[in-house]
Image: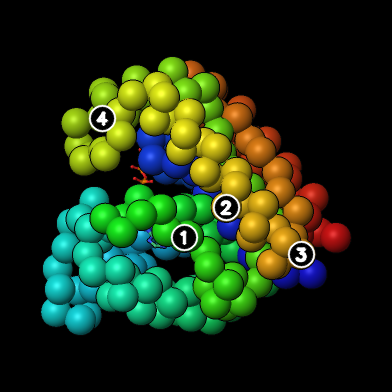
Amino acid sequence: MSRTIIVAGIPGVGKTTVLQELENVAREKNIPLKIVNFGNVMNELFKKRGKTVHRDHMRRQDLELQAKVQEQAAREIGKTGGKSALVVDTHMFVRTKDGIWPGTPRRVLEELDPGLIILIEADPEDIARRRNADRTRERDSKTVDEARSDLEWSRYMASANAVLAGAPIQIVLNPDGHQRRAAEDLLALIRKRTLQ
Ligand code: AP5
């Protein structure tokens, strides 16, 4: 059984917040866990290519270049060894200037070989509010309808991923003020799957 778990969520759903909480919960319970942020790995690889780009500008780069860096990032993450569960923090899709583009196309999935795909979701109203309140990031979509549409796209892409990887999908909710509970739910799912 693969010990790699893909955790995906649309921008502003609170993925980073919940995964930070997951790290705390796992530490408190003495459960070894490694979390890798796919966007960070890509960002470093852009830098190594002499192209320093803000994380919110990577999706605006030429698609061929993004695809090369995406695949390279997947190869690097795929080599991450160790006995603990590996959580890959990423996106089911990215809104590029060429259109909606898969975050984990076939070649990326083959490198990651996930045993489980977890989607973090929240109420579209909450997501829109979080996106508008977060001044530290550049969000492309900010309305409730856009959040709803992003949630749908995320599920479409997740089902394609599940078919290709033969991995099940779970959904974890991140309601306002309940990031700790979301992290505990996430940890329970990860434990259940990686202990099998
Ligand atoms: P990434 O780093 O994943 O960026 P992101 O999705 O924009 O992540 P954020 O951290 O901004 O959003 P979040 O949903 O985690 O929200 P947050 O916790 O901050 O990816 C960056 C880039 O990398 C992508 O744009 C793409 O270009 C590239 N990339 C990544 N994977 C790729 C792939 N596979 N292929 C190609 N490119 C890829 O929370 C938002 C706000 O809400 C905060 O203010 C927070 O305090 C608040 N909040 C969160 N939870 C709660 C709660 N429960 N109650 C109240 N407030 C809450």
Mark 4 or 3, which is nearer the eye? 3
Give the mark, 1 or 4, whose residue is nearer the N terminus: 1
**Disc 2 and disc 1 in contact, CB within 8 angstroms:** yes
**Disc 4 and disc 3 in contact, CB within 8 angstroms:** no
Graded by Cα atoms within 10 Å as few (under 14), some (14 to 19) or many (20 or more), the crowding at tag 4 reads few
**Disc 3 and disc 2 in contact, CB within 8 angstroms:** no
Name the amino acid, label 2: Met
What is the x, y in percent for residue 5? 63, 59
Instruction: Tell me the CA gap for discs 1 and 3.
Output: 17 Å
**Residue 103's disc number:** 1
**Disc 2 and disc 4 in contact, CB within 8 angstroms:** no
Q: In this view, does 82 lie above or below 132?
A: below
Mark 2 or 4, which is nearer the eye? 2
Instruction: Tell me the CA gap for discs 3 and 2.
Output: 14 Å
Name the amino acid, label 3: Gly
**Residue 157's disc number:** 2
Give the mark, 3 or 2, whose residue is nearer the N terminus: 2
Instruction: Tell me the CA gap for discs 2 and 4.
Output: 26 Å
Determine the secondary structure under disc 4. loop
